[in-house]
Amino acid sequence: LGLGNGPVSDPLQLVLYLLIAFVLLLLVLDPFGSLPIFVAVFKGVAPERRTRVAVREVLIAFCVLLGFMLSGEGFLRLMHLSERSLEVAGGVILMIIAIRMIFASGGEIYATDAEREPMIFPLAVPLLAGPSAMATVLLLASRQPERLAYWIGALTLAMLVCGAVMVLAEPIRRLIGSQMVNAIEKLMGLVLTAIAVEMVLAGLKRYFFDPS
């Protein structure tokens, strides 16, 4: 993931770790690519309740991902999984998500009843706290548990951005236009594809050349 091991004493290096993890989580959560879904789902929500619903869904997603992050090592031991297998699996999941971001239309991914207020599905799970996000936070925490505070900070910042985008989904879409939203999603998909390939290669390298 481009993050070294060992203690961090340089404040600039600490900021760099936070930034890398924040950008990675933001790419995985993909709030800007999910704008069409946010707009479609919130059509059935009264305008005065949209902020409250968005905050609730973001908090639920944050708690789910935080739970995966805190229980990462225990979960791996319980399931008899290695970090290498998780890294490869996480890379494959990210690759699938990235391909979806590049070639599919976001508004068609999750069908929902426009007359009902969303509760957990589809906003909190699986749109925010989906398989790719769960695998990413699990991998971060299991590979470098000594930096758990940094990962929690990065997750918090990423979820705050997701909440802001969710609340402002319709104004953002009107401001930049649907074509720009689609272009941003495809660009983020390309970046996420490179990250996914790097994760798979790193996992395979550790499996074949560092089996201990």
Image (tube, rainbow, N blue to C red):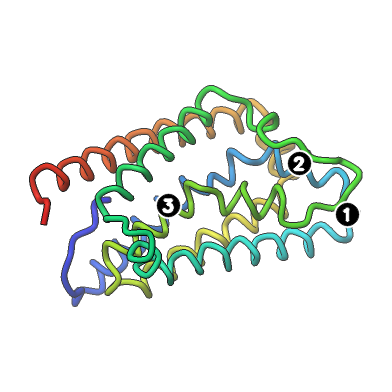
The residue nearer to you, when weighing 77 against 138, is 77
Q: Position of residue 93 (x, y in %)?
A: 43, 39
Quadrant assignment, res 167: bottom right
Q: Nearer the viewer, mark 1 or mark 3?
A: 3
Q: Secondary structure at mark 1?
A: helix
Q: Earlier in the sequence, mark 2 or mark 3?
A: 2
* CB atoms of marks 2 and 1 within 8 Å: no
Q: What residue did someone put label 1 on?
A: 47
Which amino acid, mark 2?
Answer: Val
Q: What residue did someone put label 3 on?
A: 135
Disc number for residue 39: 2
Distance of mark 1 from mark 3, alpha carbons?
A: 34 Å
Q: Secondary structure at mark 2?
A: helix
Which quadrant of the rendered structure holds the C terminus? bottom left
Q: Position of residue 202 (x, y in %)?
A: 21, 44
Q: Secondary structure at mark 3?
A: helix
Distance of mark 2 from mark 1, alpha carbons?
A: 12 Å
